[in-house]
Image: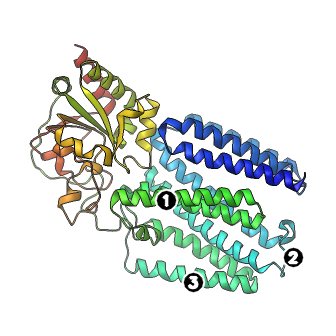
Amino acid sequence: MNANFAALSYLIASVFFILSLQGLSSAKTAQKGANYGILGMILAVGTTLMNPIVGSYGWIITGIIVGGVIGTIIAKKIQMTALPQLVAAFHSLVGLSAVSVAAAALNEPQAFGIGAPGFIHGSSLVEMGLGVVIGAITFTGSVVAFAKLQGLVSGNPLVFKGQHFLNALMGILLVIGIAHFAMTESHTTFWAMTFLAFLLGLTLIVPIGGADMPVVISMLNSYSGWAAAGIGFTLNNSLLIITGALVGSSGAILSYIMCKGMNRSIFNIILGGFGTEAQTGGPGGATTDKPVKSGSSEDAAFIMKNAKSLIIVPGYGMAVAQAQHALREMSDILKAEGVDVRYAIHPVAGRMPGHMNVLLAEANVPYEDVLELEEINRDFGTTDVAFVIGANDVTNPAAKTDPSSPIFGMPILDVENARTVLFVKRSMSPGYAGVDNTLFYNDNTMMLFGDAKKMCEEIIKSLEE
């Protein structure tokens, strides 16, 4: 295949990937963005397969078939509630790929055109060192994130004395290791770096609390991109370099936006110091014995039907119950009654960025009705009813009033300012951050205990009657 043709094809594929990212930045254009990404990937894979250096198509075709079948099965069976941990799992595979490619290049450099054993180009050694370190950190960090999100391990932070010193020491040793590897091509140094990077990925993520996982997901997304870029340098593949850089930079920007939404420091995330404050409880832990006002679906239907304005605040509980379709039906009935219905989305609602937006889009909720925190927060003070369905930590006033709270300083949706707050929840247990929500005990709050989907269906029934 002509080199100029390959370069042109890779350039076109890169443009498709850029258009894909642009499309995915908005719910209205997300489908178009996904299609651009598919076209770009088809072109990229096709061009690579036509490269004359490809010596055996058997393993490649086998890998495509096996991977395609597995991916198709996962895509059809995965629930929206499990999407965050699926993303974390996929990130780990990108990291492991970077480690595998670097190891292969070290053992067979002539196959990659980077020299011969013992005589690998110095620049290639630096690229391999960076790729294996970033890839290993991404792999173990993503595995820990997956385990926390899947509930295989506790979502609470695991903090130990000297944690930051240990992380800093391992970081310094890795920098020294990369320099030594670049000068000596030592296999021992390479595998020592790999092991140390695997360990660092573990110690960076275990101290991060479950409520902060949305930011961790976006951070690992960035790491996986830079790992892919490292693979691109090792393989001398310009498209992989560009694609990895796009994913890495967009993930970093998203991490910054998420940090801003939670009033956290981006450096704390990178250094593994994010969400490590002492928790005041744990999921399912003890709550206070303060009295709360509880109501029924009939009470909620009466209050909402007689309201002029309603703001719905969805959260992870809505995702678990798959209540988005019933919620949209409920809002359609209220709109027909003349109620102004809108949705308020917190930047870290759910367990990954955009989780709630995807669920509402799946239920065909009009895009113009879905507003972000900064667009709608001031409107709660003039709203008749705030209907909180499954959200918890992102509505907790303790973030503004309790300096000892692990979520203190995080911008929240000011639902407590609404005239009436209807809070749908299964029980009085705290949210994923393990913090009791003081909003439950306010005079203007009515708790609606039960499954989110069932509650919405009962409210619909009451509205129709």
Please report whichever mark, 3 or 1, sits nearer to the chain's N-terminal start: 3
Q: Residue at x 74, y 79 (%)?
A: 187
Residue carrying label 2: 116
Q: Amino acid at mark 2?
A: Ala
The crowd level at tag 1 (other Cα within 10 Å; few <14, some 14-19, many 20+) is some
Up/down of 202 relative to 79, above or below = below
Q: Quadrant of residue 7?
A: bottom right
Residue carrying label 1: 253
Q: In the rendered view of the protein, which quadrant contains the C terminus? A: top left
Q: Amino acid at mark 1?
A: Ile
Relative side of 213 to 42, left or right: left
Q: Residue at x 28, y 18 (%)?
A: 336
Up/down of 68 relative to 114, above or below = above
Q: Quadrant of residue 244?
A: bottom right
Q: Residue at x 52, y 57 (%)?
A: 251
Relative side of 37 to 371, left or right: right
The crowd level at tag 3 (other Cα within 10 Å; few <14, some 14-19, many 20+) is some
Q: Nearer the viewer, mark 3 or mark 1?
A: 1
Is mark 2 in CB contact (under 8 Å) with mark 1?
A: no
How far apart in space, not on screen, are marks 2 and 1 (Cα)? 39 Å
> SS of the residue at dot 1?
helix
Res. 146 visible in picture: yes
Q: Which mark is residue 173?
A: 3
Please report whichever mark, 2 or 3, sits nearer to the chain's N-terminal start: 2
Image x and y of residue 342, in percent: 30, 33
